[in-house]
């Protein structure tokens, strides 16, 4: 009986202590040993959870900083004359305006000086802004796109020379063409095609050169078109295209600078000739003014001379 009363009294005190403690107060530890041990264990688990969360947050910040620094290094190290390369748009002239705008936002957020700790973040951000401005300018974008298209055509010509004598490539293209023609013929038969469907299937096995990536309007087998489309989608071709475009853009910029230098020299020559002409005219005007001022003196001297001569004759 005494034992039951003691337990009841202890339970009452525990309940009263829990009721009087606020939500921000530490838990009441005047309970039994078992209850107190459970509370300490929960606190340790909570503390360890908070520590792991802080560690994860710090790790993600480090990863983010590393990514921003790497992006800054990429922007600063890329070819400055190609705005697509600065914005990391590997589709280049095939990129849409929405893709250009979206990529600009992503890159500019990564290299923004307020968020990136790189020492040259401001320079990288200015390059990104200039690249986006060039792609928003119709004339600058048209020039960049034309150069890239020219680079693509040059690469296609070089590849056509290599593949024209490659028996393995020609066999693969012929197999692709035959497979496509057979598939087209079966599709026509399944649709109940009229007589002459075989001719249509054969015609369908050829595509204009523009679709095949030739750019010359030639008619090429569809197998060649498929192989070339797959090749141009590869990373190797994209790398070659960037290098070729870089070469052509460098040549174009060099010619532009040479032309600017010649124009500057011509302008300096014209300006110098105009300055010399002005100085010559000023000199002639001064001489004329001096001659006009001395006219009366010369006339007076001549009159005096003639009078003296007449007097000598009379004598």
Image (tube, rainbow, N blue to C red):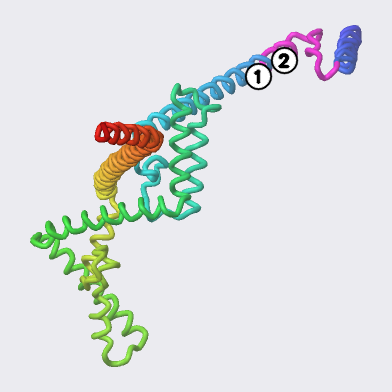
Q: Mark 2, residues whose alpha carbon is within 10 Å: few (<14), some, or many (≥20)?
A: some
Q: Residue at x 52, y 35 (%)?
A: 109
- Are discs 2 and 1 less than 8 Å apart at CB? no
Q: Is residue 48 above or below residue 278?
A: above
- The one nearer the camera, 81 or 187, is 81
Q: Which mark is residue 46?
A: 1
Residue 167: x, y in percent?
Answer: 9, 62
Q: Which mark is residue 315?
A: none
Q: Is residue 80 visible?
A: no
Q: Which residue reaches farthest bottom?
A: 195
Q: Is residue 209 above or below residue 83?
A: below
- The one nearer the camera, 34 or 6, is 34
Q: Is residue 39 magenta?
A: yes
- The one nearer the camera, 193 or 30, is 193
Q: Is residue 30 visible?
A: yes
Q: Which residue reaches farthest front?
A: 315
Magenta stretch: give its range.
22-42
Question: Considering the image in quadrants, where does the C terminus appear?
Answer: top left
The answer for how far apart the CA atoms under marks 2 and 1 are is 11 Å
* Secondary structure category for the residue under label 1: helix
Q: Is residue 182 left or right of residue 72?
A: left
Q: Which mark is residue 39?
A: 2
Q: Is residue 138 magenta?
A: no
Q: Residue at x 48, y 54 (%)?
A: 97
* Secondary structure category for the residue under label 2: helix
Question: Considering the image in quadrants, where does the N terminus appear?
Answer: top right
Q: Residue at x 47, y 33 (%)?
A: 125
């Amino acid at each position: 009986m005494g034992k039951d009363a003691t337990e009841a009294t202890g339970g009452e005190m525990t309940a009263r202590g829990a009721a009087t403690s606020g939500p921000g107060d530490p838990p009441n530890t005047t309970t039994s040993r078992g209850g107190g041990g459970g509370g300490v264990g929960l606190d340790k688990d909570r503390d360890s959870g908070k520590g792991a969360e802080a560690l994860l947050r710090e790790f993600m910040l480090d990863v983010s900083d590393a990514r921003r620094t790497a992006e800054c290094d990429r922007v600063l190290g890329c070819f400055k004359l190609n705005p697509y390369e600065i914005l990391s748009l590997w589709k280049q002239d095939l990129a849409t305006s929405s893709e250009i705008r979206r990529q600009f936002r992503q890159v500019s957020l990564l290299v923004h000086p307020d968020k990136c700790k790189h020492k040259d973040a401001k320079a990288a951000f200015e390059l990104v802004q200039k690249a986006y401005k060039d792609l928003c300018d119709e004339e600058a974008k048209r020039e960049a796109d034309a150069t890239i298209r020219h680079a693509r055509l040059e690469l296609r010509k070089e590849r056509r020379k290599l593949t024209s004598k490659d028996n393995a490539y020609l066999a693969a293209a012929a197999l692709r063409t035959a497979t496509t023609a057979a598939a087209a013929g079966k599709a026509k038969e399944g649709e109940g095609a009229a007589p002459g469907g075989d001719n249509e299937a054969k015609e369908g096995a050829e595509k204009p050169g523009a679709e095949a990536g030739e750019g010359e309007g030639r008619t090429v087998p569809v197998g060649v078109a498929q192989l070339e489309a797959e090749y141009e989608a590869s990373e190797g071709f994209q790398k070659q295209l960037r290098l070729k475009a870089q070469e052509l853009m460098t040549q174009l910029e060099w010619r532009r600078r040479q032309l600017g230098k010649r124009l500057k020299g011509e302008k300096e020559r014209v300006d110098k000739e105009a300055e010399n002409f002005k100085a010559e005219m000023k000199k002639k005007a001064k001489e004329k003014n001096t001659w006009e001022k001395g006219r009366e003196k010369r006339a007076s001297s001549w009159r005096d001379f003639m009078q003296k001569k007449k007097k000598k004759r009379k004598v």
